[in-house]
Amino acid sequence: MSELLFAAAAGLPMAAGWSLHALRLRHRIEAARRDPLTGLWTRDPFTERAERRILSRFRPVAVYLVDLNRFKEINDTHGHAAGDAVIRATGERLAAWAVDHSAVVGRLGGDEFAAIAPVYSHGHLSETLHRLSDSLEQPVEAAGQVLEVSASIGAVGANPRTKRVELSELLRLADEQMYRAKRCAVPWSNALSLEKQCPTVHGRRAGRSGTHGGTEAAA
């Protein structure tokens, strides 16, 4: 019995070492899947988690698409360090919002972000959009300057329990609403149905970056 106990005790450091190695490896893998500037999920891990939310059919959800306004102007006028400060602040604000709203948030690239969160009614969605917009449009301090920030937010609500929906479809509809908000110079817009309002080119809204034949500039 004493020999068995000794052998087990001798194996503890090795087991602890492997556990620590596995934990560090998991942290490295997770870090690689997060945007280094904001700490938010990058596109692929955001997509995986958002799709799981929809497939669970647990409750109605809303998908949000956020695009910063005049971000290129900030970069061109104040420099890329200022642009990075705006992106970083936006990521922090979205992360705080995500905690309060049980949301999954990701940075899709550039100055574009996406989120998915539970929603209970059109009124609840409108209230959430008001609060999110107010949070994102706070000034950002960078290199001794105060930068005005604004965002266009598009959103769409869906109930996976009553209608089968795909994340790509909801992002496409949220993108339409984001473009509508940008075009109308309003902070946000949410879809009242799951019907597309804009023409589609190669599965994307006509006029969006990466499409051809659109009549509007890319949002």
Image (tube, rainbow, N blue to C red):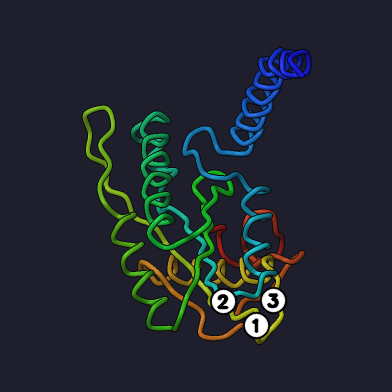
In this picture, residue 108 sits left or right of residue 213 = left
Measured along the vertical axis of the image, is residue 205 above or below residue 98?
Answer: below
How far across and how far down the image is residue 212, in percent?
71, 60
Name the front one of labels 3 and 2: 2
Q: Residue at x 21, y 29 (%)?
A: 144
Mark 3 and mark 1 in contact (Cβ < 8 Å)? no
1 or 219: nearer the viewer: 1
Disc 2 residue type (three-letter)? Arg
Provide the residue designation for mark 1: 161
Which quarter of the figure has residue 146?
top left
Give the residue type at disc 1: Arg
Helix, strand or loop under label 3? loop
* Residue at x-position 40% and y-position 36%: 83
The front one of 157 and 102 is 102
Disc marking residue 59: 2
Q: Residue shown at 65%/79% (left/top)? A: 160
CB contact under 8 Å: marks 1 and 2? yes
Residue kind at label 3, given as amino acid type: Val
Residue 147 is left or right of residue 82, and the answer is left
Find the distance from the CA under tag 1 to the CA under tag 2.
7 Å
Between the residue at mark 3 and the residue at mark 2, the CA separation in whole angstroms equals: 13 Å
Q: Which mark is residue 165?
A: 3
Q: Secondary structure at mark 2?
A: loop
Q: Going 38% across and 69% down the picture, which residue do you hit?
A: 129
